[in-house]
Amino acid sequence: MSDLKVLARSRDALSDEFLQAAVRFTADRLRGKKKVSTEALGRWEEWRDRGQAIRAHTVSHLDFYLKQFADNARQAGANVHFAATGDEAISAVMHIAQEKQAKSVVKAKSMVSEEIHLNHHLQDAGIDVVETDLGEYIVQLAKETPSHIIIPAIHKNREQIRELFTEDGGKDLSTDTKVLAGFARRRLREKFLNADIGVTGCNFGIAESGSICLFTNEGNADMVTNLPKTHIVLMGMERLLPTFADLEVMANLLPRSATGQKLTTYMSVITGSKRSGDSDGAEEVHIIILDNGRSRQLGDPDFHEILHCIRCGACLNVCPVYRHVGGHSYGSVYPGPIGAVLSPLLAKGRQEQARLEERGGVSTASGEQRGATPTMEDDYSDLPYASSLCGACYEACPVKIPLHDMLVKLRQKKVASGQTSGTERAMFRGFRIAFASPGRYRLSMGVGRAMQGPLVRDGYITTTFGPLAGWTSSRYAPSLAKTSFRDGWAALQHSLGDVSKEDGE
């Protein structure tokens, strides 16, 4: 990822006053509701400990639970596909769509589908695809990506939404919430009734039964899974729970952490395809389990806990960086602290997989030989620097993922691999040389104190050029004191010594 792209997106966000106000308002509101709901539940830290233990156990035995889940899902009538890469997942979806001669697809919210850019592939094949989550529907009309994990259109106001709906419907609408919601409801009902395939994500897969569980607040996922004859589930390989007893823990942790709700409005559990006597349900269910770089974190002591994430978005709501720049500044499907760690790790895993396939490796998902050279994507290696390392993300995380530690480790890896600029390396070499000797340290501080003069205004450095400009454009940079602490301390000791001598005389 180019530094220039990151800086450009960040500058655009910092100049967008509405974006900053909207993100701050929503994040503060969600944090407040979370506080109330977790206090009502009681013993929140114990719940976090239970959630952490469940996720740690599951990820540590992921091979066992993946097999158990797949076996039970197939026994219940579902078709299970393993995809090592995003391309394999896309291929599986397109094969199903072609087999069903699908003309239209309706989707419930799915971060995995965003990760593999599913909509673009379906549209390129001439298939009409519509997001049915209201926020996702809005950003789809705007031809944008979600800017928050659970609130995709956090950056849009009612006037902007009115313009999008008016353009889509060809009829002028007001900004009244009921009018806008009514328009979306009418448009989406048509799509639900005529869709050939429904696509959803998966909050959790239950290994003991082969069930998939969806948490939603709008009810659209129930329409997507029941009205079309074919239902495709896209599931990250780590999104498993061993038992329904574990789901009970997550049903308390996830809604409270995400939106501050005691319970999500709809919690749907789907086990296999429609059976004889069932009044609803898809006649055919396909579950596509995606790796796409995830397995590279298994067994890595530094980063395996990233697979514990339950995608609640709580870390975004407390992050001081996210609240200033929003989600699009990250340039990744996953924004905020979780994205700053997950995106580089997944990209690295995908690139390593691509290199193996380029050398004639074998895909772990299908066992087929690969010949084409995959296209390398952005590595997102700059995202770990989009953090103040305050640790608020860890305190907010319902399963205690140490994101702040992982951000530091990713920075260390970037430095160790020589990816930093020559200027940065030269500056730190100079820093090391100066601080290795008391004499050189005093000399460098003296030189800095003398040279800062033209840049200081009212005790602060206010430069708008040079290496400090990125800092001083939005923060105060205090100037070096006229007298160092050591010099001041020596002078104080000297004066006290003189006083002692006078008293002795």
Image (cartoon, rainbow, N blue to C red):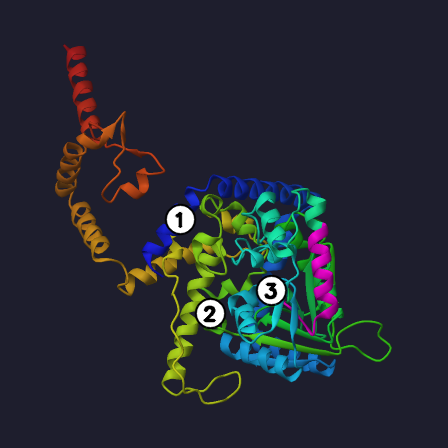
Question: What is the quadrant of residue 210 in the picture?
Answer: bottom right
Kindly identify the residue that appears in the image at 76 percent across and 70 percent down: 227
Q: Position of residue 369 (x, y in %)?
A: 45, 89
Q: Amino acid at mark 3?
A: Ser
Residue 498 in the image, given as x and y percentages of width and height: 15, 16
Q: Quadrant of residue 502?
A: top left
Which residue in the structure is indicated by mark 2? 297
Which callout, 1 or 3, points at the residue further toward the start of the chain?
1
Residue 299 is a magenta residue: no
Q: Residue at x 48, y 66 (%)?
A: 304
Q: Residue 10 got which mark?
A: 1
| In the displayed structure image, the side of residue 185 where residue 421 appears, left or right | left
Q: Are marks 2 and 1 in contact (CB under 8 Å)?
A: no
Queried whether the magenta region covers residue 193, the answer comes back as yes
Q: Position of residue 466 (x, y in %)?
A: 22, 43
Tell me the kind of residue under disc 2: Gln
Q: CA distance from mark 2 to mark 1?
A: 29 Å
At 74% from the left edge and 65% from the top edge, which residue is drawn? 223
Q: Is residue 246 visible?
A: no
Quadrant occupied by the N terminus: bottom left
Please provide the residue range marked out in magenta: 182-201
Number of marks in the rendered image? 3
Q: Assign the magenta stretch its main secondary structure.
A: helix
Measured from the top left, where is residue 413 in percent x and y? 34, 63
Q: Is residue 422 visible?
A: yes
Q: Is residue 425 left or right of residue 130?
A: left
Classify 472 as above or below 6. Answer: above
Select label 3 or label 2 by which is in front: 3
On screen, 181 above or below 294?
above
